[in-house]
């Protein structure tokens, strides 16, 4: 079997194991390194060639955004990542980095269960960090923290190791303060990010390395060593010893929830229907055999496939050829094909079960925010997506 065929069969296998899925977004203030991080994660997970990462911005394929140099459309990529002897399917939803597109960030947040919050070590927590974090927390999306551009603190700002530590502490405490003030009550403490447990990582997306406490313990590499590697211009070596994708995706698997875990507390918040009903139970249990419940988070036009709607399946299974009901517009439509993402590509799979991000082609009149269900089992619509674009809490 070719590598590609193997990858497809792996993804098809993992999509039926919600405990081994992580649906995540990367959120950041503009220029803090979200694009560089996404590209290097994909390259590291073997989904694009390493030489291309950084040069070719796979997530930035919209021409309009290329012209402006900012990310407008939310795009999807998926990766298979081995961790502690098991393989995981990681679906990464790109989120726009510009505050004007807050609506898109909110939509992307509906599809995911966890978020990697990227903060540039040089600039620290910025207004958009706060906005995107707020959007995530409002959707009951759990955060982990990646402090990026650490190389610059050492090589450009020439900070001493103690000063480095002070910066880190400041960023972490600001992020935790935001989590405390903006997270749902039951998660204010539980979702605090902590250096000790590995829910905070440090590194350089550009130079492709990262470190957190569990990896330090595993490899014996200390902050002092990191300092030396950067100072001595040996970051390539560091990238081989502690590769960005391994550390970051390990942190994602370990600390961010699977759909089966998160749907138990997210469904009651994003869906106001009867939780005791068949569809309510199917969503709470991420059951692929229950009634269909999909929330569409993005629609875009593909040159070849026409309209492609991307959404999160909370319950049931969507199939090629299905007749579906669009709850918001009270119309029916037919699904031409369904698929999932492999790297930045879409692959048709004929069926996609609960817990996954699905790409639906050929369904007419579908818009972002729409709820999709079976024609014979109509369900209540998901909560509408609220646009948040202004920081509400001020960072001290
Ligand atoms: P985005 O707006 O958050 O997507 O940020 P980008 O990924 O486009 O990065 C913004 C700029 O910062 C680019 O010039 C990157 O090359 C640079 N950059 C990103 N990460 C790092 C890093 O870890 N170290 C350094 N020195 N530069 C970085």
Image (spheres, grey):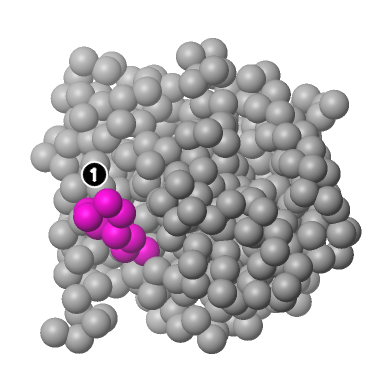
Name the spot of residue 301 as percent of width and height, x first.
49, 70
Q: In which quadrant is the C terminus drawn?
A: top right
Question: Which stretch is magenta?
Answer: 79-89
Closest to the observer: 88 or 354? 88
- Residue furthest toward the right? 157
Name the spot of residue 231 as percent of width and height, x first.
76, 68
Which picture quadrant has residue 226? bottom right
Name the spot of residue 271 as percent of width and height, x first.
39, 25
Figure check: 134 above or below 188: below
Q: Residue at x 57, y 41 (%)?
A: 200
Q: Is residue 256 left or right of residue 386?
A: left
Residue 219 in sight: yes
Q: Residue at x 28, y 16 (%)?
A: 274
Say what secondary structure mark 1 lies in.
Answer: helix
Closest to the observer: 301 or 123? 123
Closest to the observer: 186 or 153? 153
Q: Magenta includes 210?
A: no
């Amino acid at each position: 079997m070719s590598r590609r065929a193997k990858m497809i069969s792996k993804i098809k296998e993992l999509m039926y194991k919600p405990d081994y899925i992580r649906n995540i977004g990367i959120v950041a203030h503009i220029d803090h390194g979200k694009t560089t991080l996404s590209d290097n994660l994909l390259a590291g997970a073997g989904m694009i060639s390493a030489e291309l990462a950084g040069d070719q911005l796979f997530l930035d394929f919209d021409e309009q955004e290329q012209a402006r140099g900012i990310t407008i459309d939310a795009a999807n990529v998926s990766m298979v990542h081995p961790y502690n002897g098991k393989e995981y399917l990681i679906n990464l939803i790109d989120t726009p980095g510009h505050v004007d597109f807050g609506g898109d960030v909110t939509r992307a947040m509906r599809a995911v269960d966890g978020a990697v919050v990227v903060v540039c070590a040089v600039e620290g927590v910025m207004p958009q960090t706060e906005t995107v974090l707020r959007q995530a927390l409002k959707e009951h999306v759990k955060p982990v923290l990646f402090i990026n551009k650490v190389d610059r603190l050492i090589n450009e700002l020439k900070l001493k190791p103690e000063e480095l530590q002070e910066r880190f502490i400041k960023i972490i405490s600001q992020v935790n303060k935001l989590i405390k003030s903006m997270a749902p009550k039951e998660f204010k403490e539980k979702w605090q990010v902590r250096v000790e447990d590995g829910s905070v990582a440090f590194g350089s997306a550009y130079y492709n390395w990262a470190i957190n406490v569990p990896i330090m313990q595993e490899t014996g590499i200390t902050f002092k060593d990191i300092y030396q590697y950067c100072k001595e211009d040996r970051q390539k070596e560091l990238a081989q010893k502690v590769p960005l994708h391994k550390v970051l995706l390990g942190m994602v698997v370990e600390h961010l929830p699977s759909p089966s875990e998160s749907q138990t507390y997210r469904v009651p918040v994003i869906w106001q229907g009867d939780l005791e009903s068949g569809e309510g139970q199917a969503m709470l249990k991420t059951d692929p055999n229950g009634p269909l419940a999909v929330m569409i988070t993005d629609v875009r036009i593909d040159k070849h496939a026409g309209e492609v709607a991307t959404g999160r399946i909370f319950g049931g299974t969507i199939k090629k050829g299905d007749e579906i009901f669009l709850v918001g517009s009270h119309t029916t439509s037919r699904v031409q094909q369904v698929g999932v993402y492999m790297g930045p590509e879409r692959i048709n799979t004929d069926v996609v079960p609960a817990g996954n991000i699905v790409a639906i082609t050929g369904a007419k009149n579908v818009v972002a925010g729409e709820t999709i269900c079976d024609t014979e089992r109509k369900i209540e619509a998901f909560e509408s997506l609220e646009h948040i674009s202004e920081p509400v809490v001020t960072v001290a």
